[in-house]
Image (spheres, helix red, strand yellow):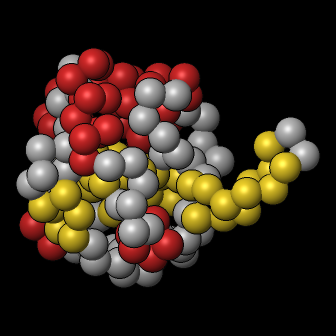
Amino acid sequence: MLEVGTKAPAFELPDQNGVVHTLEEYRGKKVILYFYPKDNTPGCTKQACNFGQLYPQFTEKGAVVLGVSKDSVGSHKKFEEKYNLPFPLLSDPELSCIQAYDVWKEKVNYGKKSMGVVRTTYLIDENGVIEKAFDKVNAEKNPEQMLGEI
C-alpha cells in the first residue's frame, strides 16, 4: 500500500464506455479511488452498489468516485448496466495502475496461493496527494466509511 502524504501515481485508463480518465483531470477535487477484485462477485457488487447509493452525497461534497479492476471494458459495461452504477469503472487488464498503487498481492484462498487485487481504497486530495489509504477494507461498509472521511 502506498504511503499517506505521497503523490498519487498518474494513470490513464478507459471506463466502461471506453472514455479515458486520468488522475490529472480531477485536480481540484477529492478522488475516492477504490480497487476491487472482480465485477459481479458478491463483495464487489455490494461495494459498488453502496458507492452508487451514496454517490449524490459524494458529488455534493465535490468528490468523485472511481472503481478500478482488471476486468475488461465490456465486463464493466455489463456490471454498470446491471446495477445502474453512476460512476466510472476503470479497466486495467495490463495492471499498470493496479501495480502502481501496490494492490496486486499474493492471496491465499482455501490454502491455494495466487496473485490478485487486494480490496484497497485511497482518498486523494485536490492536489493529487494521498490523504488516506485503507487496505483489506470491508466491501459493504467502505462507501459509508469514505463518505465520513471527506
Look at the image and tell me whether residue 28 can be seen: no
> Residue 138's spot in the image, x, y percent?
60, 35
Decide which of 43, 1 is in the foreground and name it. Answer: 43
Judged left or right of residue 32, residue 127 is left
Seen in the picture, residue 122 relative to 57 is either above or below; the reply is: below
Residue 3, horizontal then vertical, whole percent: 54, 75
Q: Residue at x 56, y 63 (%)?
A: 103
Seen in the picture, residue 150 relative to 1 is either above or below; the reply is above
* Nearer the observer, 89 or 3: 89
Q: Residue at x 20, y 43 (%)?
A: 16
| Residue 17 against residue 135 in the figure, above or below | above
Residue at image position (48%, 45%) is 36
Question: Where, by quadrant of the figure, is residue 59 drawn?
Answer: top left
Towards the viewer: 150 or 82: 82
Quarter location, residue 100: bottom left
Residue 124 on image: x %, y %:
33, 63
The N terminus - image quarter: bottom right
Where residue 105 sits, quadrant-wise, is: bottom right
Which residue is rendered at x = 28% and y = 77% of the image? 10
When the figure is inspected, residue 138 is found, relative to residue 20, above or below; the finding is above
Visible residue check, residue 6: yes
Question: Residue 12 appears at what percent x and percent y?
Answer: 21, 70
